[in-house]
Each structure stands twice: as structure tokens, then as C-alpha cells.
Image: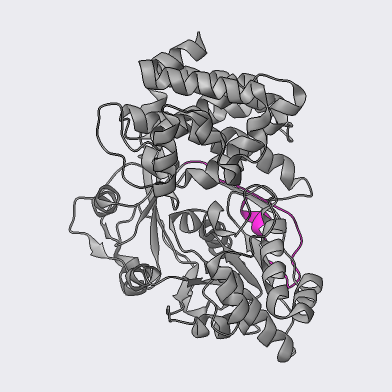
């Protein structure tokens, strides 16, 4: 890698300009015109392009997987802007690696070759997904997008989008409705089913994807649901790479390298992809690019979700309240860093199994180094977004395990109190926290009520279920929230870490 940047006028990224890019930028060695598709990926955000697209690109660089190119897809009108930006540069992406030791480097990846137009009713996407060359449909649509009932963890059939798709299966509005409609066409046309590959941070994400697809299909066509359940595969997977959002700074960084890229992606110098080897229609040899195929995905994902993702929530809510802009800033805050370390070692690690070559304590140290990377401008706001899904998915399962084992829940209770205080909508300096959750208005109202009546927060049964019935949790939560409101975040962090 290198950090030697170019000062020449940036070149607009496209197939035609690849060969003219500065010499220090890696680029596709393969003939992109000869690639054929095998994957449709729904949710073409930064993470997918820095992670799954990169693994496929690495194979292509070695002359492999030439028939597994990616076609992008989106489900909402706002995805059209992303599609247009990528189309204007032939679906190429500049990846900028931010390594605190080796510096920054740039690479153009070309494993994506098309993006389905976004049309109301999603017919073009259904038809493209139904074609025989598509053998994997992958998704990164955020943890909160799978219509899971927070309390029961079962399928939420009462959501308006689900009701729509059940009543209008030919014009679905959800990714799952599209998958079902496409699989129906494949069955009718004698084409075998494809694999559904979830790449979101959910424990048992393949099983959750299966649950959502099959449950939705049963509402309109039980026979089709049974066919999907029998013929499609939904492997569990664990993905890991810290990928900040793209803004003016990232675009400027790409230009410093000599590339005019409308949607570049920055990322840390670490990736991990652990996958269950269950693909009904074949797969690329991702293991040759560093992915791990194993039957023990759950152990890897539990370590990552409980230490990294839960750790992110411990930092970000407090960081928002303290006005700390990035996760690296949070790690540079002594009291906040001590809070994270103590909670991880004492209240999270006891409920995490070791995996080959990595013990929980060593993983905590690795995560600490990754979080502290000052080159990764990962904002506290991005990490704190959609707390109603992320706390339910990342922190509360650990809390339940700790309660069942009779362990300490002080730090986890403090994390929930920090979230409740953040959702009151103002930082400690009085500045407003803009809406950052799909249920923000309800959360703000409940958080403001909880200022005087802390238990009101825990009465959100859709989030906490019966956890509030555990006095060790409810009393600790009330103590911490009261202290935060009376003396501030810093006082609470110091008291916990003392």
C-alpha cells in the first residue's frame, strides 16, 4: 500500500478512463465487458461495495468468478439517485483504505456491472431476478428491515408493507415480496430456486431471511411458500468491516488520488466474512479471497455482534450526548473508553465463546484498536442510528444472558439509560439531536416522560419484553438514568468505571 497521492486534475471514473488513472491506484485487470451476472444485491450502500463486492473483485483479479458479476438493486425511490451516480461511472467504485500504520491507498473495483431501474411495482427487478443466470440474491438492508417482532422475534405480519405485499403479490413494495414474486416465476418457468444471502448484522441472519420470506409467502400462496422453503437455501453469514458514510470529505479524498468518483467508499484495513456453505445454485469461491466457510457461523457472529456492534452502541449514545463527532473521538475520551472496556470485559465477554485463533479478550483488544483509528471518520450519529433495532438486536440479548446467569448488568443498564437520555432529543450542551430512528417521535416522548418516571422507558414492551420484570436491571437502569439527568453523562461514566 502507499499514501502517495496525486495532484493532477482528477479523471472522471469510467471504463474509458481506467487505464489513464494514476499508476498508484489499483484497478481491474479483468475484461469487464466479458463478465456475466450471477448475483443480484439489494441495498447497494457503502458496506456492500467495500465488503462483498471487494471479495468478488479479488477473485476476478485472479481470473475466477467471471460469471458471478453483481447487478445492483434498490427498493425505494431514493435509491434511484445512487443508481444514476453509479451508472454514470459504469458501476465502478473507488475504495480508499485507511490504514493507521501504512497510510491510505486507493483501488477501483469493477465486480458490479449493472443496476436495475427502480420502478413502482418493481416489475423490472422481479423479471431480472427470475432469470436463470441469477443464482444468488443478497441483501444489506439494515438490521431493522426484516419485519421482526422485537419481543417475540417472530415474523411481524401486521406491518403495513407486509399487508400490502400479501394482498398485492404481483406489485410488492418489500425486498421479500420481490424475492417471492421472482421465485414464483422461476417455478412456473421450470427454473431452479436461487440462494437468499443475508449480509446484515443479525444473529442467525439466514434463518431470519428464511423466516421473513416463507412467512410472507404463506400469507398469499402457502403452496409456493412450501416450495421456497424446500428448494431455496438461506445460509447464515457474518460480515465485518467498518465503513463510514460518504460525504464531501470522502469525495475530496478520492480526488486527491486523481479520481473523480461521485460515490467513493472509505474503509478500515480489516475485513471478515464467515459463511455457512449452503448454496442451492452454486457460489463463487470466496474462500480463495479470504472468506471463511464454516458450520460455526453463530460463534463468529456472536463474538462480532456482542463485542463490536454492542460496543458501538455503548460508545455512540454517550458520544452523541457529549458532542463527540466520531467513534475515534469517543475512544479518545478517557471516561467513555474506560466504560466501554469495563463493560466489554466484565459484562459481555463472559457470554461470548472463543472461535479458532481468537479469544473474546483478544477480540476486545482488536476492536479497541479499530475503533480508535483516527483515519476512520465514522460518525457517532451513523452508529447511533436506528437504536430501537440495534439495542434490541445487539445489547438486550446479552442483558438477558447476564440476568439468567446472575451476572452483573450495571454497565449494560447504563448503556440503556444513555440511550434513553439521548432519545430525549438534546445533547448536554443543549443542542438538538436530529431524528435518527424510524420511531423517533415516540422515543422522544417516552424519553422525556422517563426523565421523571424512569420506568416509563422500560415499559416499551415492543423493545424490552419482560426484561423490566428483573429488579436488578430495572433498579440499575433507574439509578443510572436519574444520575445522568441530575449530574450528567461524565459523572455516570466515572462512577461506573471507578
- Depth check, front residue: 412 or 449: 449
Residue beneath the point at 71% across and 26% down:
403
Q: What quarter of the picture does the N terminus occupy?
A: top left
Task: Write down the region rendered in magenta.
Answer: 269-290
Compared to residue 291, the image places residue 379 above or below, namely above
For the point 79% across and 81% down, which residue is it?
223
Residue 168, horizontal then vertical, whole percent: 58, 82
Overall secondary structure of the magenta section = loop
Residue 248 appears in the rendering: yes
Which residue ends up furthest to the top in the rendered image? 498
Image position, residue 122 (x, y; %): 50, 81
Residue 343 shows in this picture: no
Residue located 61% across and 29% down the image: 363
Snapshot quadrant of residue 182: bottom right
Q: Is residue 140 left or right of residue 225?
A: left
Between 67 and 204, the one lying in front of the other is 204
Number of disc labels: 0
Residue 464 falls within the magenta-colored stretch: no
Seen in the picture, residue 455 relative to 3 is either above or below; the reply is above
Q: In the displayed structure, does residue 132 sit left or right of residue 26?
A: right
Q: Is residue 186 above or below residue 197?
A: below
Residue 186 on image: x %, y %: 69, 85
Residue closer to the observer: 302 or 88? 302
Question: Residue 468: which quarter of the image?
Answer: top right
Residue 283 part of the magenta segment: yes
What scheme was used to colour the molecule?
one colour
Along the horizontal axis of the image, is 8 left or right of 174?
A: left
Of residue 443 and residue 437, the one placed in the foreground of this image is 443
Instruction: Tell me where residue 251 appears, x and y as whole percent.
Output: 27, 54
Amino acid at each position: 500500500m502507499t499514501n502517495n497521492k496525486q495532484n493532477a486534475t482528477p479523471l472522471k471514473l469510467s471504463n474509458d478512463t481506467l487505464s489513464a488513472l494514476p499508476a498508484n491506484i489499483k484497478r481491474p485487470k479483468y475484461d469487464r465487458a466479458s463478465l456475466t451476472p450471477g448475483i443480484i444485491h439489494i441495498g447497494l450502500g457503502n458496506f456492500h461495495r467495500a465488503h462483498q463486492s471487494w471479495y468478488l473483485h479479488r477473485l476476478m483479479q485472479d481470473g475466477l468468478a467471471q460469471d458471478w458479476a453483481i447487478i445492483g438493486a434498490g427498493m425505494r425511490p431514493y435509491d434511484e439517485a445512487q443508481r444514476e451516480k453509479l451508472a454514470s461511472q459504469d458501476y465502478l467504485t473507488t475504495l480508499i483504505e485507511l490504514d493507521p500504520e501504512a497510510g491510505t491507498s486507493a483501488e477501483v473495483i469493477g465486480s458490479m456491472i449493472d443496476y436495475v431501474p427502480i420502478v413502482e411495482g418493481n416489475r423490472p427487478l422481479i423479471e431480472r431476478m427470475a432469470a436463470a443466470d441469477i443464482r444468488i440474491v443478497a441483501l444489506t438492508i439494515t438490521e431493522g428491515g426484516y419485519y421482526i417482532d422485537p419481543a417475540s422475534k417472530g415474523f411481524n405480519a401486521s406491518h403495513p408493507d407486509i399487508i400490502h405485499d400479501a394482498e398485492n403479490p404481483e406489485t410488492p413494495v418489500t425486498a421479500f415480496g420481490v424475492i417471492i414474486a421472482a421465485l414464483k416465476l422461476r417455478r412456473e418457468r421450470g427454473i431452479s430456486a436461487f440462494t437468499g444471502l443475508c449480509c446484515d448484522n443479525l444473529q442467525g441472519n439466514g434463518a431470519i431471511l428464511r423466516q421473513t420470506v416463507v412467512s410472507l409467502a404463506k400469507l398469499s400462496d402457502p403452496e409456493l411458500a412450501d416450495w421456497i422453503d424446500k428448494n431455496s437455501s438461506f445460509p447464515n453469514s457474518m460480515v465485518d468491516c467498518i465503513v463510514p458514510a460518504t460525504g464531501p470529505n470522502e469525495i475530496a479524498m478520492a480526488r486527491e488520488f486523481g479520481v473523480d468518483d461521485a460515490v467513493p467508499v472509505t474503509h478500515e484495513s480489516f475485513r471478515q466474512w464467515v459463511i455457512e456453505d449452503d448454496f442451492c445454485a452454486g457460489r463463487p469461491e470466496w474462500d480463495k479471497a479470504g472468506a471463511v466457510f464454516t458450520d460455526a457461523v453463530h460463534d463468529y457472529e456472536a463474538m462480532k455482534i456482542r463485542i463490536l456492534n454492542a460496543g458501538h452502541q455503548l460508545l455512540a449514545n454517550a458520544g452523541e450526548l457529549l458532542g463527540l463527532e466520531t467513534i475515534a473521538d469517543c475512544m479518545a475520551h478517557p471516561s467513555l473508553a474506560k466504560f466501554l472496556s469495563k463493560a466489554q470485559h466484565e459484562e459481555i465477554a463472559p457470554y461470548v465463546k472463543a472461535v479458532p485463533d481468537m479469544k473474546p479478550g483478544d477480540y476486545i483488544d482488536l476492536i479497541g484498536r479499530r475503533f480508535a483509528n483516527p483515519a476512520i471518520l465514522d460518525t457517532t450519529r451513523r452508529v447511533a442510528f436506528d437504536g430501537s433495532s440495534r439495542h434490541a438486536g445487539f445489547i438486550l440479548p446479552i442483558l438477558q444472558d447476564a440476568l439468567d446467569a446472575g451476572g452483573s448488568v450495571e454497565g449494560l443498564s447504563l448503556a440503556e439509560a444513555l440511550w434513553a437520555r439521548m432519545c430525549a432529543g438534546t445533547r448536554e450542551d443543549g443542542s438538538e439531536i436530529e431524528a435518527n430512528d424510524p420511531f423517533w417521535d415516540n422515543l422522544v416522548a417516552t424519553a422525556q416522560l422517563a426523565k421523571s418516571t424512569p420506568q416509563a422507558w422500560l415499559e416499551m414492551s415492543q423493545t424490552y419484553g419482560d426484561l423490566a420484570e428483573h429488579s436488578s436491571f430495572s433498579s440499575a437502569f433507574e439509578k443510572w438514568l436519574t444520575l445522568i439527568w441530575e449530574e450528567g453523562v461524565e459523572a455516570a461514566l466515572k462512577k461506573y468505571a471507578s
